[in-house]
Amino acid sequence: MEKETEEKLAKSLTAETTELLEYIPYLLCDLWEIGSSPYDMEELIRKNIKHYENFEVLDLGCGKGAVSVKLAESLGIHVKGIDIIGDFIEFARKKSVEYEVSHLCEFVLGDINEAVTMEKDYDIVIFGAVGNVLGNPEETLRKLKKTIKDNGFILIDEAYLISSAESIKYKNYEYLPYDEWLCIFEKLGLRVAAEITVSAEQEVGSDAEMAFIEKRAEELIKKFPEKKSIFTGYIQSQKNEYEDLEENVKGVTWLLQKI
Ligand SMILES: C[S@@+](CC[C@H](N)C(=O)[O-])C[C@H]1O[C@@H](n2cnc3c(N)ncnc32)[C@H](O)[C@@H]1O
């Protein structure tokens, strides 16, 4: 994998260093959902789109397939998920079998930077908490837009800076204010069909998830004491990101339509 791809991959997983990448599948082994809320994505589709039954959906940076499998299961739509971590793709495939939707799901190992140049004509493209892997917000949305049909949809899970934000704790990501996002949508011909914002109280899963990750990090520290700093650094980054979500930024999932 190229250095830049590795660095962006690490950032998409809140990792400070690419050295951590080989341990990510283990650190996240107790979790299925590692980014977006499948329930928010499902609700946005169900409530705002008519006749989604035969939709073809592309899930870029699908992680362990939580969103794809749950959408296939609850809405009966076809999903193609692409991720660069082989263990995640393997996990996603197993889950699609467990949930009896393997006939609706295709999980492929690949780099989404290449995928966006080849994948076309989808009804919906999902970009769930993947960060700046495809570039800045405008570049990202331009690339996503090319993968969908006319009047197709983009489902993007992001976070925007709130106006009272003081100092951002998680420094690896540049958050835009809400209005700047709206300007980009307008410039690119994207209509906000709907949005769901996440309040701090709704971030309830976070404590339980954090506990799982911390437990795995402790095991790794015992096994590789010389690498303690990369594991403690990872935990700290996760905490900083959660604290920002409580104080400085708001998690949001937008359903955008190409007009
Ligand atoms: C925070 S996770 C989100 C996963 C999933 N979208 C979800 O919401 O559950 C970010 C994902 O982006 C993937 N990723 C990062 N860079 C990538 C790339 N260049 N190509 C494919 N996947 C990539 C990571 O492997 C990881 O699974």
Image (cartoon, grey):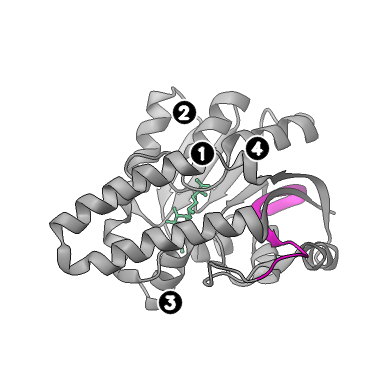
Q: Which residue is mark 3?
A: 4
The residue that disc 1 covers is 205
Quarter of the image where one finds residue 209:
top left
Task: Please identify, in this view, whether the residue under mark 2 or under mark 3 is nearer the observer.
Answer: 3
Highlighted range, magenta: 147-166
N-terminal of the two: label 1 or label 2? 2
Which quadrant would residue 220 be assigned to in this image? bottom left
Query: Amino acid type of disc 3?
Result: Glu
Residue 14 visible in the picture = no
Q: Left or right: 132 with respect to 22? A: right
How far apart marks 1 and 4 lie (CA) works out to 14 Å
The residue labelled by disc 2 is 103
Give the Cα separation between the discs numbered 1 and 2. 30 Å
Please identify the dominant SS of the magenta region. Answer: strand
| Callout 4 amino acid | Asp
Residue 119 seen anywhere in this rendered image of the structure: yes
* 137 relative to 149, above or below: below
* Residue type at tag 1: Gly
The image shows residue 118 at horizontal and vertical percentages of: 56, 60
Please state which of residues 109 and 244 is positioned toward the viewer in this rendering: 244
Q: Closer to the camera: disc 1 or disc 3?
A: 1
Q: Residue at x 43, y 65 (%)?
A: 9
